[in-house]
Image: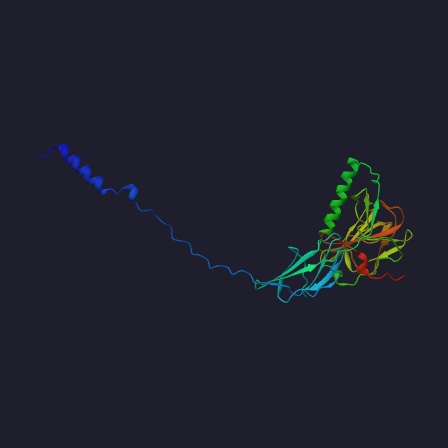
Amino acid sequence: MRSAGGGRRGRWRAALLALPLAGCTPALIPPAAPVPPPVPAPRIVDGADFHLSGAIEQGGLAMGIAPAGTAALLFDGAPIGLAADGRFIVAFDRDAPPVARIEAQLADGTILRRSLAVAPHGWKLESLPTLPRGTTPTPEFLARRKVELDQIAAARALDTGSSGWRQRFIWPVTGRISGVFGSQRIYAGEPGAYHSGVDVARPTGTPIVAPADGVVILAAAAPFTLEGNLLMIDHGMGLNSAFLHLSRIDVKVGQAVRQGEVLGAIGMTGRATGPHMHWAIKWRDARIDPAPLAGPMER
């Protein structure tokens, strides 16, 4: 006869055998995610024609027409403006490297590229055997200068939508050119800052006019430490003019001006040794020579 203990052990044994072993339980495998089809590499075409005209040289500016179907335009890897009719401008800094690259991205993904050979420019250099006399700027000057530079940067960041960039520029004033763009002094082998604009010497009070259509983006309420009475005009597409050392400013921020309209008058405010107009032009971060844009001066 089987004992009661043996019966209980048998029932436990049967129950244990009925339980699945944990290590043998099949893992739940999630269904595999669908694999997206491979994205085809964009078609790249080198040597595309952008119909460029102008000065592809250090300190120069050129206008072009983008290929049909262009959705975005890049210059040296950075997006640039593109008008509805496909026109655009590019410019080359005074110290631009010898090669620039322009790229059009079409709506179908095609990329059209072209490398531009940027011609060097023989800038006027003057070598001096001694170092310039310098002064240590005071904390007060540095604090004030930072505010001024912030104002200039904020003005240049504005996009007014002006179409003055399309026009052939005119001289804001005519007279003796007392300083040329790009000129630089070398002090005992150390290069000083180069001249970033063109100077025209005329008496204080001589009117200056807008070289092209634009919108006023900065009109100094008080003279800046270096620039004096500073006026800045946006011509659109990242192109802007600055006029320094003025004796007066006749326009206001936000005002649209037309080519040939009086903007103010020549002076010698700020750091200037005599009355003259300093005219500087920038396209984005590139400093360019105003003289070729305006052409030969008629007197």
Residue 150 screen position, x and y as percent = 73, 45
- The relative height of residue 186 versus residue 4 in the rendered view (above or below) is below
Quarter that holds the N terminus: top left
The extreme left residue here reads 1
The residue closer to the viewer here, 142 or 52, is 52
Residue name at image x 72 percent, y 48 percent: 154
Q: Give residue 47's quadrant in the image.
A: bottom right
Is residue 258 something one can see in this rendering?
no
Give the percent coordinates (x, y) of residue 21: 27, 42
Using the image as rendered, state which of residue 12 and residue 54 is in the foreground.
Answer: 54
Question: What is the quadrant of residue 160 in the picture?
Answer: bottom right
Q: From the viewer's perspective, is residue 150 above or below residue 44?
A: above
Q: Which colour assignment does the render follow?
A: rainbow
- Viewer-nearest residue: 56 or 189: 189
**Numbered disc total:** 0
- Residue furthest to the bottom in view is 68
Q: Is residue 14 visible?
A: yes
Measuring from the top left, give residue 149's x and y in whole percent: 75, 45
Quadrant in the rendering for residue 215: bottom right
> How far across and down, in percent of the image, does residue 86 sit?
67, 65
**Image quarter hosting the C terminus:** bottom right
Residue occupying image coordinates x 75% and y 48%: 152
